[in-house]
Amino acid sequence: MPPTPRSHIAPRTAVFNESVIREMTRLAMIHGAINLAQGYPDFPAPDFIKQAAIDAINADINQYAITWGSSRLRRAIAEKTRRFYGLDLDPDREITVTCGATEAMMAAMLAVVEEDDEVIVFEPFYENYVPDAAMSGAKLVFVTLRAPNFTFDPAELRAAFSSRTKAIIVNTPNNPSGKVFTRAELAEIGALCNEFDCLCITDEIYEHILYDHHEHVPMATLPGMYGRTVTISGLSKTFSVTGWRLGYILAPPDLSNAIRKVHDFLTVGAPAPLQEAAAVAMEQADSYYPELRGMYDAKRRQLLGALKESGFDCHQPEGAYYIMAGFADLGFDGDDNAFARHLIENVGVAAVPGSSFYRGIEGSRFVRFTFSKSQETLAEAAGRLARM
Ligand code: GLN
């Protein structure tokens, strides 16, 4: 008898699937639907950053940068972090440039998590955290942010912490809910990190996309938290360059050292000329941030209005560029996958099924729309939704 063929696939890849967000993008392309699924701008990046990249290539900055990031970019990040948040970081020991926040999160998890360590994550969660946990060996423990305001129950949060907890992942401003964690909420999370001696890994990629009176509070600025916080951010969302793959990590020297080793062998480093352009942008862009905020606020209002008019029940985002929209009044019996398919195939607008941000059925009440698109794209989507 021939031996049973063995599987050549590692079990760690079996516990997660391909990105649903990017699958929706592919379906949108096949059906000619407007892509309000994947969160990336369909409008140009600012001229100042594009020109800086062209100049950098022409200036022959085309070979590997230093693995941790070019010296100029790490200095620009340190300066900006000091100006905005009052944190005084050593660019040589506490800042690492990565290929997007996606690599930053994976490198951070691989550097700190041991097999079967527990990592707490709020749900709804950005879909990447599941594969990040699977590849690093973490066991995820979920704490639910409850709609409509996506607040957590302090008792439930406390109950999630134990001696097995290695870290908690916080994403503020939050994808997909649009929640911006308040200082009081962050202080509560920080106090538990101190009590249980664990780390906080914060994904702050939407730090400059905020609405109304909401302000971004970096976890690392809370009393006693710098030494146990890994802060992740990047250029993609702020400068509309998601395809450049530029992220960065702020962490105390011991953590940065471990993370840098992982990063070195994952990717060597981020693209050198684009790092140069990022440095130029961060050195001069302080007047740009309020413009960005105003631009996204107008888009938020445009899409919120359109969705409400078409019968969706929307949570008004406080930050980031997504709207979680309930579709109970539109039929489909709470089947978010069927509804998202219907939207793409028959309405011509793509969204992400809410269940990709939850482990249970709670997410199936929602689909997520992004408004990181031009006014024209949003207007066309509004027209199609209105005809639904
Ligand atoms: N962060 C974006 C989103 O949530 C893009 C996801 C991706 O494809 N990396 O839509």
Image (cartoon, rainbow, N blue to C red):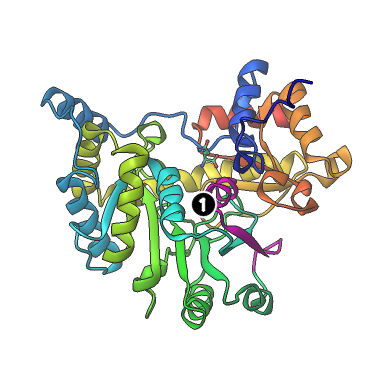
**Image spot of residue 231 (x, y percent):** 38, 60
Instruction: Please check the rendered image and state whether residue 136 is part of the magenta-colored stretch, yes or no.
Output: yes
Of the 4 image quadrants, the one containing the C terminus is: top right
Amino acid type indicated by mark 1: Ser
- SS at circle 1: helix
- Against 217, residue 237 (above or below) is above
- Of 380 and 218, nearer the camera is 218
Image position of 143 (left or right of 266): right
**Image spot of residue 65 (x, y percent):** 19, 38
- Against 160, residue 284 (above or below) is above
- Of 252 and 222, nearer the camera is 252
Residue at the outermost bottom position: 195
Image position of 77 (left or right of 102): left
**Image spot of residue 266 (x, y percent):** 37, 40
Of the 4 image quadrants, the one containing the N terminus is: top right
Which residue is drawn at the image coordinates 35% and 54% (left, top)?
A: 259
Q: Provide the residue span drawn in magenta.
A: 127-151
Instruction: Please check the rendered image and state whether residue 19 is part of the magenta-colored stretch, yes or no.
Output: no
- Of 6 and 52, nearer the camera is 6
- Against 36, residue 95 (above or below) is below
What residue is pinned by disc 1? 136
Which residue is drawn at the image coordinates 15% and 46% (left, top)?
A: 72
Which residue is drawn at the image coordinates 22% and 36% (left, top)?
A: 277
